[in-house]
Image: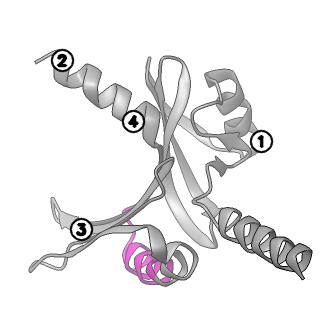
Amino acid sequence: MKRFTCLLFLMLVICIASSAQITNKILGLTLGVSTKIQVLQAISDNKLQIRERGTDIIACTSNSFEFGGYSWSFITFNFYKGKLYAIAFLTDRYPTCRENFSGLTIALKEKYEKYLTRNDSYGNGDRWVEYDDGKTTVSLSFDFRNNRYNGGLLYCDKRLMDMKSQKDKSEL
């Protein structure tokens, strides 16, 4: 009986420990690990067009790029100390951005509800939803600015994002 109880307890611990964490692997890239060379290969593999390439960012465009079951117009890859720390999927096509936001709100809630850290609605219709598991942050936004609707899905490596934020603040 003691052995059975210990085995049951061990299985429970394993189930809890293996519960769905926020993915840090996107487009075959790993946040906090992948390099610019690997990102450039993923850009080529996904037939994205590079619009801007800087030291810490690569911005791409696409007429019909699909991720997570939704269509995106722009994808940005952000780097800190040579490592990929953020990927943003963006669209300014209406009603695409509204549809993306509505569908993704439901999908992310079903998958990551226990990691919800922010769910803000503003009087002008803007929305911001954020999930954080301590390692990866995923944010979903919908807003209207400059006479355009904008929708975005952002995945960040929390450790590198915090390091970059501290560096940026130290420059002030």
Q: Nearer the viewer, mark 1 or mark 4?
A: 4
Separation of residues labelled 2 and 4 (CA atoms): 14 Å
Residue 164 screen position, x and y as percent: 34, 27
Question: What's under tag 4, amino acid-wise?
Answer: Met
Q: Nearer the viewer, mark 3 or mark 4?
A: 4
Other residues around mark 4 within 10 Å, as few (<14) / some (14–19) / many (≥20): many
Residue where numbered disc 2 is placed:
170
Q: Name the quadrant containing residue 121.
A: bottom left
In the image, is residue 101 part of the stretch drawn in magenta?
yes
Residue 73 screen position, x and y as percent: 49, 57
Residue 118 screen position, x and y as percent: 29, 68
Residue where numbered disc 4 is placed:
161
Residue where numbered disc 1 is placed:
45
In the image, is residue 16 part of the stretch drawn in magenta?
no
- Quarter in which the C terminus is drawn: top left
Residue where numbered disc 3 is placed:
143
Left or right: where does residue 67 sit relative to residue 137? right
Other residues around mark 1 within 10 Å, as few (<14) / some (14–19) / many (≥20): few
Look at the picture and state if 72 lies above or below 114.
above
Q: Nearer the viewer, residue 168 or 74?
A: 168
Question: What's under tag 1, amino acid-wise?
Answer: Asp
| The magenta segment | 89-105
